[in-house]
C-alpha cells in the first residue's frame, strides 16, 4: 500500500486547476459533523458578537483589514457543503485564470 505522504507529493505536483478540483471534491465528500450550529445557535452567536462590539470588548475590523488577506493574489477555496456548490465557482475560475497566466 502507498503511504499517504507519497500520495500527497504526487497530488501536490498536479497543476493548480486539478488540485483545486480535487480539493473541492474531497471537501464535498466530508460529511457534516455534529458541530454544525442550528439556526437558533447561529442567531445567538450573532447577538453575542454584536454585544461584544457594542460594549467594546472587541474591536471590529475595518473593511481594509477584513479584505487584506484575500488581496494577496492567492485563490481561496471556501468550504463546500456536500449538498452542492456554494456559488463561488465563477470567482474561483477568475482567480485561477489570473494565477495560471
Image: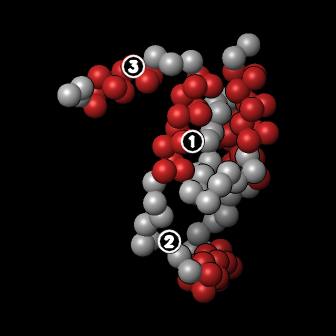
SS at mark 2 in the image = loop
Q: Is residue 31 left or right of residue 78?
A: left
Q: Position of residue 96 (x, y in %)?
A: 70, 27
The structure residue drawn at horizontal position 48% and vertical position 50%, both measured from the top left corner, is 29
Disc with the residue nearer the chain's start (2 vs 1): 1
> Which element carries disc 3, helix, strand or loop?
helix
Percent coordinates x, y for residue 17 in the rendering: 62, 25
Q: Residue at x 60, y 78 (%)?
A: 42
Picture disc at residue 36? 2
CA distance for labels 2 and 3: 33 Å
Q: How is the image coloured?
A: secondary structure
Location of residue 12 in the rendering, given as x and y in whole percent from the top left corner: 45, 22
Q: Is residue 60 left or right of residue 34?
A: right
Foreground residue among 82 and 74: 82
Q: Earlier in the sequence, mark 1 or mark 3?
A: 3
Q: Assign the N terminus to one quadrant of the image.
A: top left
Read off the residue under disc 3: 10
Image vertical order of residue 67 relative to residue 97, above or below: below
Amino acid at each position: 500500500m502507498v503511504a499517504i505522504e507519497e500520495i500527497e507529493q504526487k497530488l501536490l505536483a498536479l497543476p493548480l486547476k486539478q488540485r483545486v478540483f480535487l480539493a473541492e471534491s474531497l471537501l464535498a465528500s466530508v460529511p457534516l459533523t455534529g458541530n454544525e450550529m442550528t439556526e437558533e445557535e447561529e442567531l445567538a452567536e450573532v447577538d453575542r458578537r454584536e454585544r461584544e462590539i457594542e460594549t467594546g470588548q472587541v474591536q471590529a475590523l475595518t473593511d481594509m483589514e477584513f479584505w487584506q488577506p484575500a488581496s494577496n493574489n492567492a485563490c481561496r477555496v471556501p468550504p463546500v457543503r456536500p449538498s452542492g456548490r456554494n456559488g463561488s465557482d465563477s470567482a474561483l475560475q477568475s482567480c485561477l485564470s489570473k494565477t495560471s497566466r
